Amino acid sequence: MMNARFDLMGGWTDAPPYYLECPAAVINLQLPQFEVRVERSEGYKDNMIIDACYKVLGIVNDRSLKLVNTIPRSAGLGGSSIVAAEVVKKIKPMFTERETINTVLDVEEEIGTRGGWQDVIGGMYSGIKLTQTSPDRVGHYQIERIKDEEFLRHCLLIDTGIRREKPSPIMKKYAQGDKFTKSVLDEIRDNALRGWEFLKAKQYFAFASLMEQSWRLVCVAEEIEPVEFDGPVGYKTAGAAGGGFIFAIYENRPENLNLPDGWKVCPFPEG
């Protein structure tokens, strides 16, 4: 089983071609509220991701796998990559974690989504992670982890019901040599490294402000209007070109929120 992930800071620096050419750094959080499982079962249903996993691995699809997936589609929580990772793990249980991550990147290339490495790492490891890569060691991942229940007591995850309608232009703009986009990616990478130091020092509100600042930079690069949300010290939405979930950090987390119609809080499990 694997879980969804929320990109807190640095997301997009993990995507090609940026991470192949520049150092990358991402902080993300595993979301135990949403999960993917793959089971052996009769009654196979055609699935593009399962088919692509078998193709990349060079194995004939025996049509025996069934997905149980509670990650909302097009919500910016890394769903397609995490599904692919769970399928690869089921087909190749002897793979190392690094082999699984690198195979999923090939699967993403096969299906045309060209996702980054942070999705699999975010779904594979519990807690909060900082992952770094270097272009001179492509395919190797430096992962630091913390599990901070105190931090989560300041946080809320809110589903707005908004779903992504179009792909983000950010990697296309970077590949075309857009200098502003490159500067944004460099800045949010550096912010992720600073933000990690804030988290380790339990400076949650400094982290919250930097997280929101980084997200707003990405919104400019993606050419989207940020969702406005009053109350928290800092917040951001998930995923490419908007996503549908808000991660908010409060000084004192409210017990009751007056949310717009259709929005709902997705509580973090206790412990």
Image (spheres, rainbow, N blue to C red):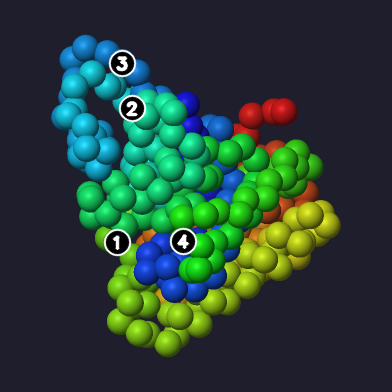
- Mark 2 belongs to which amino acid? Ile
Disc 3 target residue: 40
Disc 2 target residue: 91
- Mark 3 belongs to which amino acid? Arg
Q: In the depicted view, which residue is nearer to us: 163 or 92?
A: 92
The dot on residue 29 is none
- Mark 4 belongs to which amino acid? Val
Which circle, 4 or 1, is nearer the viewer? 4
The answer to whether residue 230 shows anywhere in this view is: no
Residue at image x 25%, y 42%? 56
Callout 4 crowding tier (Cα within 10 Å): few <14, some 14–19, many ≥20: few
Residue 2's spot in the image, x, y percent? 48, 32
Q: Is residue 175 left or right of residue 228?
A: left
Q: Earlier in the sequence, mark 2 or mark 3?
A: 3
Callout 3 crowding tier (Cα within 10 Å): few <14, some 14–19, many ≥20: few
Callout 2 crowding tier (Cα within 10 Å): few <14, some 14–19, many ≥20: some
What's the distance in space between the residues labelled 2 and 3, CA to CA?
A: 10 Å
Which circle, 3 or 1, is nearer the viewer? 3
**Are the residues flagged by discs 3 and 1 in contact, CB closer than 8 Å?**
no
Q: Earlier in the sequence, mark 4 or mark 1?
A: 4
What's the distance in space between the residues labelled 3 and 1, CA to CA?
A: 32 Å
Disc 4 target residue: 138
Quarter holding residue 59: top left
Q: Earlier in the sequence, mark 3 or mark 1?
A: 3
**Are the residues flagged by discs 2 and 4 in contact, CB closer than 8 Å?**
no
Disc 1 target residue: 167
- Mark 1 belongs to which amino acid? Pro
